[in-house]
Image: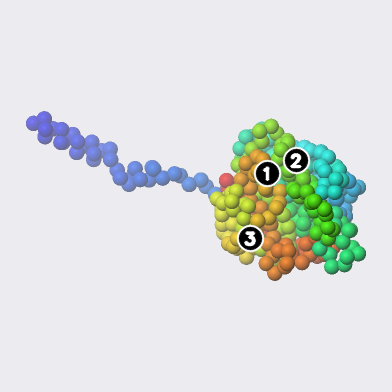
Amino acid sequence: MFKHLSLVLFIVLISCNFSPAETKSSAKKKKEPKVEAPTFNADSAYLFVQKQVDFGPRVPNTEEHAKCANYLSEKLTSFGADVIVQEAELRAFDNTLLNAKNIIGQYKPELKDRVLLFAHWDTRPFADHCDDPSRQNEPILGANDGGSGVAVLLEIARQLQKAPISMGVDIIFFDAEDYGNPDHIEIQNPKQDTWCLGSQYWAQNPHVKNYYARFGILLDMVGAPNATFHKELHSKDFAPRIQKKLWNTAHKLGYGNYFVFQDGGYITDDHIYVNKHLNIPCVDIIQYDTSSNTSFGSYWHTHDDNMDVIDKNTLKAVGQTVLEFIYNQ
């Protein structure tokens, strides 16, 4: 009798409490609703490139550099960022002391959950790849190499003010990135790590003690017509998951002709030092031109790096991809 009663009770319990379909569905994680990212304005970004170029070459220790630093700081402030200007004396490859300024814009600085977006804002003091040897010691305008990445981030800052994001965001314009060993001058016993001086300094002296971000995205040379962004290999080592998701985001938005699923090269850039010293997984979105000898375009480090090589469609592809990515983390 008790045996039969136990069996009945067992069957009743199973029929009342066990539902395979219900258990399966409850085990699934609820998918977060997609966040509508702001619309990146390429016209606005283009004007931000033009404004930087209008100052002239932005080489440390020059008046043009000082004026542009003030402009960038004021623009970030006007877009609602809490701005810090980190000043430092940095020694260049030729022992010149550079009065450098890292310009940092913080959104929701009180939050621990943060993302980092960065670019360099200085320009090359030499046109060491210029075909005319008589002009190789002249500084370049750097519309694409420097200006484009900063412009995209300024437009992103403008959108962050209009449509606040749930996490903290830091936008950093690093200085003295492009003062590395020149290619047109033979240097005896060349120093190591002469590039990316501003990011090297910040990574070892961050503006916040124990600074950390969930990930970092570097923008460098992101404005040329029909530019292609291959998967930079340091980024693939540091942050493969972030890089893959970023490229997938670009493809979903229809920008697959810009963000190609091919490996690029190992490129010395600001993201290396941010990862090395702060262990922040960083991805470098940087032009990789397989048709040029330098891999960066025929105008790289020449006087042809002017507004003629800036294309609004490329600025849009990069800017909208980054906005979509950060708003849906």
Q: Position of residue 313 (x, y in %)?
A: 70, 62
Q: CA distance from mark 2 to mark 1?
A: 10 Å
Q: Residue at x 19, y 38 (%)?
A: 11
Q: Position of residue 223 (x, y in %)?
A: 73, 60
Could you tell me which secondary element the residue under label 3 belongs to?
loop
Q: Residue at x 15, y 36 (%)?
A: 7
Asked where in the image residue 110 lies, by quadrant, the reply is top right
Check residue 201 in the rendering and tell me which mark sits there, or answer none. 2
Q: In this orientation, which residue lies closer to the viewer: 66 or 105?
A: 66
Q: Amino acid at mark 3?
A: Gly
Identify the residue under disc 1.
Answer: 274
Q: Residues within 10 Å of mark 3 (few under 14, many from 20)?
A: many
- Mark closest to the chain's N terminus, 1 or 3: 3
Asked where in the image residue 220 lies, by quadrant, the reply is bottom right
Identify the residue under disc 3.
Answer: 264
Using residue 251 as the reference point, say whether residue 193 is left or right of it: right
Q: Residues within 10 Å of mark 2 (few under 14, many from 20)?
A: many
Using residue 43 as the reference point, say whether residue 285 is left or right of it: left
Query: Please, which residue is most extreme toward the bottom here?
Result: 291
- Mark closest to the chain's N terminus, 2 or 1: 2
Q: In this orientation, which residue lies closer to the viewer: 264 or 74?
A: 264
Q: Residue at x 68, y 48 (%)?
A: 271
Q: Position of residue 228 (x, y in %)?
A: 66, 63
Q: CA distance from mark 3 to mark 2?
A: 27 Å
